Image (cartoon, rainbow, N blue to C red):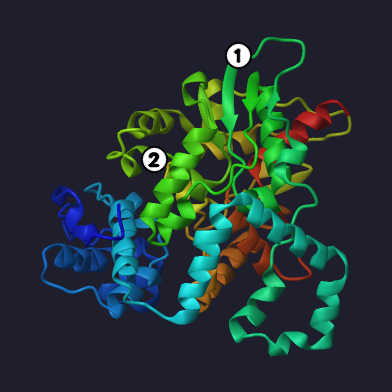
């Protein structure tokens, strides 16, 4: 894709994708924004009608159209409800790409932040790690507390001032410091050889989850290959309307892995996984990468999906464990349950952990409001969904909420009351802890 020639992303799509929607309305009760406003334009059906009108040349791309596309969470709940199998993710990403290409939402601040994040930090993991390390120093040095007490934040723009308290805590060590480039089971030949994706935000904030993932894979007979400084898989770029940068990131990922030598490529982040399984479509016109991308798609697996597929070993109770000592509930990340249709596998993992009882929450598949950067771009709607999700979590009485996406993890953690003793964990971290507990 070249920015030097005119592009009509929606018009370039196979028209069968554009006309899949039967306008039956089955998606309406599943859509958070439609339930909030009751307006047809804020529903999947309404948005698809707008997209089709643009594809047909009956409607121009305007700022109002752009705002509508960015009001959508991209939670994909509509895809689960749809009886016609509408490919909403492809429509949605191409619609946002057209909005960005035609620049109908131009504002200097918006352009600067997109340049800084999508074109700089999330294109180069080294730059992102430098920013992460500076933020870590800011957090652990006590400077963050001092700045908050001093009132200096009042001088910052309102949006930054409001975001500062929810800044994620940066991990002390990044994934490359915790995981060797190649690790194998001790004392036995590996049954499988897998590649491990460490991500961008996952690497900075949840490198411990990456370590847990490697440990669980090794425990289940996998040799784990972890390329260094992998960076963003491109999901942030694709979800935010820059398919060209997304394709560049896909090529960079493919270059880092010897895909043909691997049995599976493992991710532990739902939002990334949903995107990672569609490299083939993203690079279908790239002769140098198309076949490798299709092979990648065939081998990409969420960690819970892979563990159930190979028949993971259920941990034995540890020396000090007793049955029913703690209760957990499970929040289904949108891009895991709706985007990848993975729902039962994480529950199978949780059910196998000794001393853990699973308490189902109400509306477990409903979005928590994170939705990539939605909690930044649409804070009011995101906050409503966050409060609803936290209320459902607290109603279960569980002391642990398990979820398999970094954005969901942070959104829920930031929404819990200060006095809450509920901890947020990835299912694979709970499984890793159970394996360690076996040894006492």
Label number found at residue 367 = none
**Real-space CA distance between mark 1 and mark 2, rounded to the nearest whole angstrom:** 27 Å
Q: Residue at x 68, y 70 (%)?
A: 166
- In this rendering, position of residue 189 left or right of residue 5: right
Badge 1: how crowded within 10 Å, few (<14), some, or many (20+)?
some
Q: Which residue, given by chain and number where applicable, does mark 1 sit on? A: 191
Q: Which residue, given by chain and number where applicable, does mark 2 sit on? A: 279
Q: Residue at x 77, y 40 (%)?
A: 177
Badge 2: how crowded within 10 Å, few (<14), some, or many (20+)?
many
Q: Quadrant of residue 205?
A: bottom right
Outermost residue on the front side: it is: 4
Task: Report the front residue among 68 and 156.
Answer: 156
Task: Report the front residue among 330 and 121.
Answer: 121
Q: Residue at x 35, y 37 (%)?
A: 280
Using the rendered image of the protein, determine whether residue 293 is visible from the camera's viewpoint. yes
Using the rendered image of the protein, determine whether residue 343 is visible from the camera's viewpoint. no
Tell me which numbered mark, 1 or 2, is placed earlier along the sequence.
Answer: 1
Counting from the top left corner in percent of width and height, residue 10 is at 22, 59
User: Is disc 1 placed on a helix, strand or loop?
Assistant: loop
Counting from the top left corner in percent of width and height, residue 22 is at 16, 56
Counting from the top left corner in percent of width and height, residue 154 is at 71, 89
């Amino acid at each position: 894709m070249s920015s030097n020639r005119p592009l009509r992303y929606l018009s370039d799509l196979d028209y069968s994708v554009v006309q899949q929607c039967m306008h039956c309305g089955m998606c309406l009760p599943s859509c958070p924004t439609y339930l909030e406003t009751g307006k047809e334009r804020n529903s999947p059906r309404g948005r698809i009608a707008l997209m089709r009108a643009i594809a047909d040349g009956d409607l121009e791309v305007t700022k109002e159209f752009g705002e509508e596309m960015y009001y959508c969470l991209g939670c994909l709940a509509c895809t689960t409800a749809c009886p016609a199998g509408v490919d909403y993710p492809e429509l949605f990403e191409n619609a946002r790409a057209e909005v960005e290409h035609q620049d109908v939402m131009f504002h200097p601040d918006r352009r600067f932040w997109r340049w800084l994040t999508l074109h700089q930090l999330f294109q180069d993991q080294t730059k992102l790690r430098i920013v992460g390390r500076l933020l870590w120093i800011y957090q652990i040095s006590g400077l963050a507390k001092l700045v908050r007490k001093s009132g200096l934040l009042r001088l910052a723009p309102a949006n930054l001032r409001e975001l500062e308290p929810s800044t994620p805590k940066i991990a002390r060590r990044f994934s490359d410091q915790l995981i060797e480039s190649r690790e194998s089971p001790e004392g036995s030949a590996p049954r499988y050889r897998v590649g491990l994706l460490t991500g961008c935000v996952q690497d900075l904030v949840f490198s411990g989850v990456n370590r847990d993932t490697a440990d669980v894979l090794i425990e289940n007979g996998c040799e784990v290959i972890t390329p260094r400084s992998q960076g963003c898989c491109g999901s942030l770029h694709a979800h935010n309307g820059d398919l060209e940068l997304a394709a560049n990131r896909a090529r960079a990922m493919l270059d880092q892995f010897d895909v043909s030598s691997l049995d599976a490529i493992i991710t532990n982040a739902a939002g990334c996984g949903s995107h990672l399984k569609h490299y083939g479509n993203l690079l279908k016109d790239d002769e140098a990468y198309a076949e490798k991308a299709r092979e990648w798609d065939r081998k990409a697996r969420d960690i819970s999906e892979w563990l159930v597929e190979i028949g993971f070993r259920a941990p034995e109770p540890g020396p000090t464990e007793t049955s029913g000592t703690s209760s957990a509930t499970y929040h289904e990340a949108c891009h895991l349950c709706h985007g990848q249709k993975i729902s039962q596998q994480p529950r199978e993992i949780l059910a196998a952990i000794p001393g853990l009882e699973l308490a189902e929450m109400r509306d477990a598949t409903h979005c928590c409001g994170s939705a990539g950067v939605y909690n930044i771009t649409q804070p009011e709607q995101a906050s409503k969904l966050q409060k609803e999700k936290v209320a459902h979590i607290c109603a279960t009485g569980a002391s642990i909420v398990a979820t398999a996406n970094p954005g969901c993890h942070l959104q829920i953690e930031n929404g819990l009351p200060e006095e809450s003793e509920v901890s947020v964990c990835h299912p694979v971290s709970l499984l890793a802890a159970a394996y360690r507990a076996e040894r006492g």
